[in-house]
Image (tube, rainbow, N blue to C red):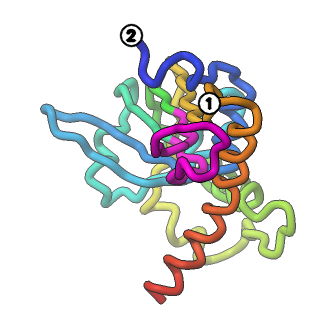
Amino acid sequence: MNYPPEHHQDNNRDHLIEVIKTYPLATVISVHRNQPFITHLPLIFENGKLIGHIDINNLQTELLKDNHEISVIFSGPDCYISPSIYTTTQLPTWNYIKVHLKGKVKFNLDKMELKQSLISMTNFLEAPEHRYTLNANNPRLDKNLDYIVMFEITITHWEGKFKLSQDKKPKDTAAARKALKQSSQESIEQFLNKVF
């Protein structure tokens, strides 16, 4: 049995790619001798693969060598859904968007490709304003290339988990969507006000 239920799963590849592009900070999970290693890295979807960069001093780097299996999670928006927003009687729940991927990793040790990949990733992440351009002649960039490893993940399994009150009446689904949008903005502001 699949969980969440089928109506909370999304197998539309375009939807999953959109999550990856909009929320590129991924949770990268490797397992070695039954111990999980977890790193949070931005990954860019390019030519059907995920491209990333990792610090050579990160313990997980060794586990990203060629053909190791890896799991990756991308997280979209999420929030608590109060029954008070519904027009029908419901119980409290949590709505969320997640993309779970599995794949095989391959290192790319070419320094020029690493450099270009870092420039391309920066360009992608700066969109749409492009207020900063990572220049190929930046001396700090060249100095750090020896400490960064580029890798690509060939995706072998895709799974979308879009729990968005799709099983409710249209009015309630719309109310849950509105709550998700509002909560995302409000929770960020409240959290930042508490912490900073």
Answer whether residue 82 is magenta in the image: yes
Q: Nearer the viewer, residue 14 or 168?
A: 168
Determine crowd level at label 2: few under 14, some 14-19, many 20+ residues with C-alpha closer than 10 A: few
Query: Which numbered disc covers residue 49?
Result: 1
Q: Where's residue 185, x and y in %?
A: 66, 67
Residue under the image location 53 percent in, 52 percent down: 82
State left or right for residue 54 relative to residue 78: left
Q: Residue furthest top?
A: 1
Q: In the rendered image of this protein, does residue 34 appear above or below residue 59?
A: above
**Which stretch did the figure color magenta?**
74-99
Q: Quadrant of residue 160?
A: top right
Q: Amino acid at mark 2?
A: Met
State left or right for residue 4 relative to residue 61: right
> Circle 1 — which element?
strand
Closest to the camera, between mark 1 and mark 2, is 2
Q: Residue furthest right?
A: 129
Label 1 – label 2 distance at C-alpha = 29 Å
Query: Which numbered disc covers residue 1?
Result: 2
